[in-house]
Image (tube, helix red, strand yellow):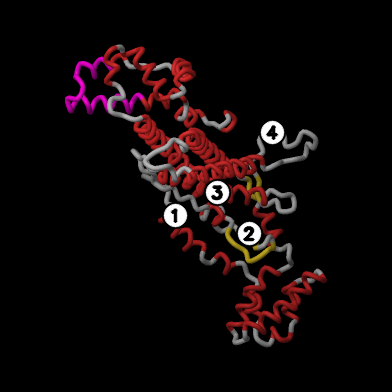
Amino acid sequence: MIERYTLPEMGGLWSEENKFQKWLDVELAVCEVHAEMGTIPREALQEIKWRAKFSVERINEIEKTTNHDVIAFTTNLAESIGPASRFVHYGLTSSDVVDTANALLLRDACDLLLQKIDGLLTVLKRRALEFKNTPQVGRTHGIHAEPTSFGMTFARLGLRPAPVSTQIIQRDRYAEFLGTLAIIASSLDKFALNVRHWQQTEVREAQERFTVGQKGSSAMPHKRNPIISERICGIARVVRANSQVGLENVALWHERDISHSSAERVVLPDSSIALDYILHKATSLIEGLVVYPERMLENLNATRGLIFSGQLLLALTRKGVSREVAYEWAQRNAMKVWDEGKDFQTLVKADADIKAHLSVEELEGAFSLTSYLSNVDAIFERVFNGKLDVGPHR
């Protein structure tokens, strides 16, 4: 992953220095076991632990000749250890070291990602509760539909981190890891896409925080662009694409080949670093999201009452009108709103068929926002006391 999208802690975890350190940790752990079993002398173990060190620069130099990174690594260790180095890598294959070290790296990467997810869930819960009772027009097919709670947009983001086992060799586990990262990235993508829509000039229901000194366009000084949301959406595509590599790596020839290893050198660190970055950005985005409830009300009223057609339909059916007939009565008035710019409630109150079945109070009730938010408390209780309860995912 390029430096621009690499945060220090996750970047350091996937550095060459840390990778080789994990290799050394594995080699030393195996030597410890051999010494306990009596396979190698205890004195040799002490010599190895005391003298073992490596240089990334020297390993890369040796690999130019060996064309084998693990041999280059063990050769460099031998240069520092001396005669006792003959007991290093004793009974091991290259994949034994690399796969075990990868498990350690993935474990550490998961710990960092889960910390980020916990932080994001904390912000989500706070902002969800803040806007729990803020009505916002729902949209289906891009058209205004029934109202909803803006707070539920945060409560239903859908992050589901899955535990990833360590000490693994089978590539289906790596595919699961990469697939899990892709699903989380896609959930962030979905939310960021909503922000991009909310920030459109014609909508303007919410926007990314625009800081002092920030510039939106090199040519148009008035611009405020959703650049963080767009960046999240873009990098999420990279994480999803990398998950396909994980699936391709599941099938290997016979007992073992290394067709997977070259790709894993790219996708495992890149996906971890990329998701770490967009989790960080998503948390900042949601924390600083500027919300315009007044504009939401303006948009709710933009269709001159059409968003209540569903409630009107239900009110008529409750009074014994067949659904087909009730739909026809509601639709004929709705079409006049679309085509002639009239007010839906005014037309409905003047419709003889509808007036014959609904009282004035019942008509008023059909055009109320209250029922759309009536289940919000129950939904929030279920979500935040269960599925998205903030806490460590261990």
Secondary structure found at label 1: helix
Which amino acid type corresponds to the residue marked 1 in the rendered image? Phe
Which amino acid type corresponds to the residue marked 3 in the rendered image? Ser
| Residue at 24% over, 25% down | 32
| Residue at 36% over, 12% down | 79
User: Which residue in the structure is indicated by mark 3?
Assistant: 186
User: Which residue in the structure is indicated by mark 1?
Assistant: 384
Mark 1 to mark 4: distance in Å? 35 Å
Which amino acid type corresponds to the residue marked 2 in the rendered image? Gln
Q: Which mark is residue 214?
A: 4
Mark 3 against mark 4, which lies toward the viewer? 3
User: Crowdedness of circle 2 by 10 Å Cα count: few (<14), some, many (20+)?
Assistant: many
Q: Is residue 25 magenta?
A: yes
Count of residue discs? 4
Secondary structure found at label 3: helix
Mark 3 to mark 4: distance in Å? 28 Å
Residue furthest left in the image: 38
User: Which residue in the structure is indicated by mark 2?
Assistant: 136
Q: Is residue 34 magenta?
A: yes
Q: Quadrant of residue 339?
A: bottom right
Q: Is residue 105 left or right of residue 244?
A: left
Residue furthest front in the image: 254
Decide if residue 276 is in sight here.
Answer: no
Q: Is residue 82 left or right of residue 249?
A: left
Q: Which comes sooner in the sequence, label 4 or label 2?
A: 2
Mark 1 to mark 3: distance in Å? 21 Å
What segment is highlighted magenta in the picture?
24-49
Which amino acid type corresponds to the residue marked 4 in the rendered image? Gln
